Image (cartoon, rainbow, N blue to C red):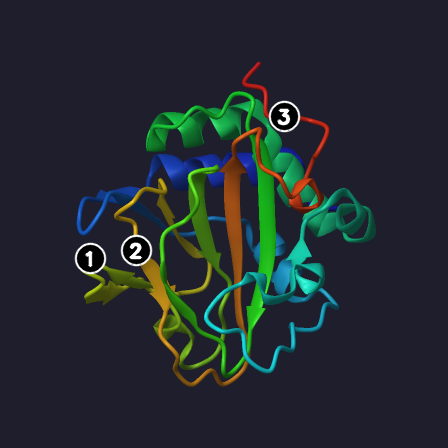
Amino acid sequence: MIDVARTARHFRRAVTDSHRGETPYRHWTLVDVLPDEVGFGLISLPIAPLLIDDCHGVRDTDNQKRTFLTPWLQSRFPVCATLAQALQRPEVARVMGETCGFEAEGSYLRIEYIQDIDGAWLEPHHDVPEKLCSMVIYLCTGPDAAEWGTDIYDDRLRWVGRSSAEFNSATIFIPGANTWHGFEKRKIVGIRRLLEINYVHPRWRDRDQLCFPEQPVSLG
């Protein structure tokens, strides 16, 4: 069994030790985010990648086929339940809110498991304000995997850099009008696996995407 408390401690340590950058917008870079058994457990899940002929540069082409760590998925796979329960814990939500400067109390946890295959791309965009915090944990493997990070743009939509997608590294930012990011179309040999983690506002409409749709985050 994968221990929830150990996962929470490991995650909190990664957030506490994160490096803050200021350009082109404030963000935090993390390493060794999840215990090995959680990271490798997630990429071993028997879930096939989403097959879409043309994603049109967005994620919501077919929401019904996306993989969220819902109560149902947690009931099927213990590693999903462990991660969701760990990030729902008061001490984890508190360190996220205090580190990144958002109000975690009363928010809801949303975690998506993403598996991009060759042909996937995302147009430059900034997240909706209902996402109080956006985090990507990279679970990419393979010789080119480090190059599969998120592309970053300035407020004129000029490409300014790319995050590393080293296995078990992560980036956090607080959504805002200038937080432009995407994924330039490039060759993917294998599967680009990642987690998108959000603490979202109570007015989030897609309740079927939430880890605990009836249980807001409480800081205790």
Residue lying farthest top? 220
Q: Residue 56 at what x, y percent from top left?
A: 49, 73
Q: Are marks 2 and 1 in contact (CB under 8 Å)?
A: yes
Q: Where does residue 169 sit, x and y in percent of width and height? A: 41, 56
Is 51 located above or below residue 63 in the figure? below
Which of the two discs, 2 and 1, labels the residue nearer the N terminus? Answer: 1
Residue corresponding to mark 3? 216
The residue that label 1 is drawn on is: 154
Rendered image quadrant of residue 71? top right
Disc 3 marks which amino acid? Pro
Residue sitting nearer the eye, 183 or 146: 183
Q: CA distance from mark 3 to mark 1?
A: 34 Å
Q: Earlier in the sequence, mark 3 or mark 1?
A: 1
Circle nearer the N terminus (2, 3): 2
**Residue behind mark 2:** 180
x 76%, y 51%: residue: 73
Whether residue 90 sits left or right of residue 175 in the image: it is right
83 versus 182 height, above or below:
above
Mark 2: secondary structure = loop
| Cα–Cα span, label 2 and label 3 | 28 Å
Q: Is residue 203 left or right of residue 142?
A: right
Specify the quadrant of the image occupied by residue 213.
top right
Q: CA distance from mark 2 to mark 1?
A: 7 Å
Q: Is residue 186 above or below residue 169?
A: below
Identify residue type, mark 2: Trp
Q: Amino acid at mark 1?
A: Asp
Question: In the rendering, at what x and y percent does residue 217 appear?
Answer: 59, 25
Q: Residues within 10 Å of mark 2 (few under 14, many from 20)?
A: many
Circle 2 or circle 3, nearest the eye: 2
